[in-house]
Image: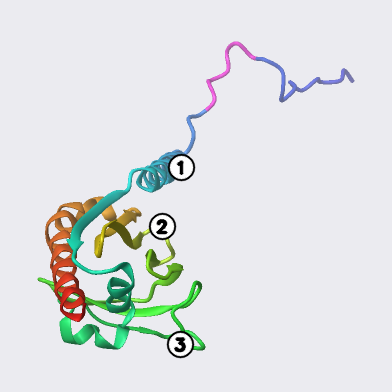
Amino acid sequence: MTAIRLPSATAADPHADPLPAPAPRRRRRRLCLGAGAALVALLAGYTAWTQTHPVRLSASIEIEASSEEVWQVLTDLPAYPRWNPFITSTEVTSKGGRLEEGATLRNVMHDSSGDTVFTPELLTVEPGRELRWLGKMGPGWIADGEHRFVIEEIGDHRVRLTQSERFTGVAVPFVAGRLKTETLSQFRAMNEALAQRAEAAG
């Protein structure tokens, strides 16, 4: 009997039909994976961009008082509800209750939309010179605000107080207009009220 040789599965057959196209399900999966990767890359790029393009606010006022007198008003936290139109309440909530670097605050900030509570961490406490804290919304990449008060002596019994904030995070560009109008106006209102209180005390 003559042996019958079966065609090899790997042998090329010029008359064979072309391979079938990928199944629709497999094609959809590849498209979804590609779209997901592109979306992740887009979001990562946007997040990085918001960290390097902060929104900055700054408001300054000159005060007829010494740097110590201005510092005393700025750091007398229990008195805030009596005079402060912007930070209507603040207290140190971390252990020890002292106004020092690393401590945590509980700030109630007021604007036209109502009250908002933040719990920032104090980064700098330099008596008579600078008070600075960092507040975060969410895990940190959503919205961060680094708030500063800087006191500079500009003459005999005269100082300049500058209140500023640096905002970063993916949510910040969507509220930049409101920050530059409503929030900045609250900076100015607080500066004016603080100046009046420090000058009256002096």
- Mark 1 or 3, which is nearer the eye? 3
Question: Which SS class for mark 1?
Answer: helix
The three-letter code of the residue at mark 1 reads Ala
Q: Nearer the viewer, residue 99 or 141?
A: 99
Q: Position of residue 200 (x, y in %)?
A: 15, 79
The three-letter code of the residue at mark 2 reads Trp
Name which residue lies at 89% across and 20% down. 1
Task: Looking at this view, name the residue that lies furthest to the front.
Answer: 156
The three-letter code of the residue at mark 3 reads Gly
Q: Is residue 66 left or right of residue 48?
A: left
C-alpha distance separating marks 2 and 1: 20 Å
Q: Is residue 185 left or right of residue 3?
A: left
Main secondary structure along the magenta-highlighted residues:
loop
Q: Nearer the viewer, residue 146 or 160?
A: 160
- Mark 2 or 1, which is nearer the eye? 2
Q: Nearer the viewer, residue 149 or 168?
A: 149
Disc 1: CA contacts within 10 A as few (<14), some (14-19) or many (>=20): few
Q: Is residue 132 left or right of residue 197?
A: right
Q: Position of residue 18 (x, y in %)?
A: 53, 21
Q: Which residues are magenta?
A: 13-19
- Mark nearer the N terminus (3 vs 2): 3
- Mark nearer the N terminus (2 vs 1): 1
As drawn, 181 above or below 193? above
Q: Position of residue 175 (x, y in %)?
A: 20, 56
Q: Position of residue 113 (x, y in %)?
A: 12, 72
User: Can you tell which quarter of the image residue 83 is in?
Assistant: bottom left
User: Can you tell which quarter of the image residue 152 is in?
Assistant: bottom left
Question: Which label is found at residue 141?
Answer: 2
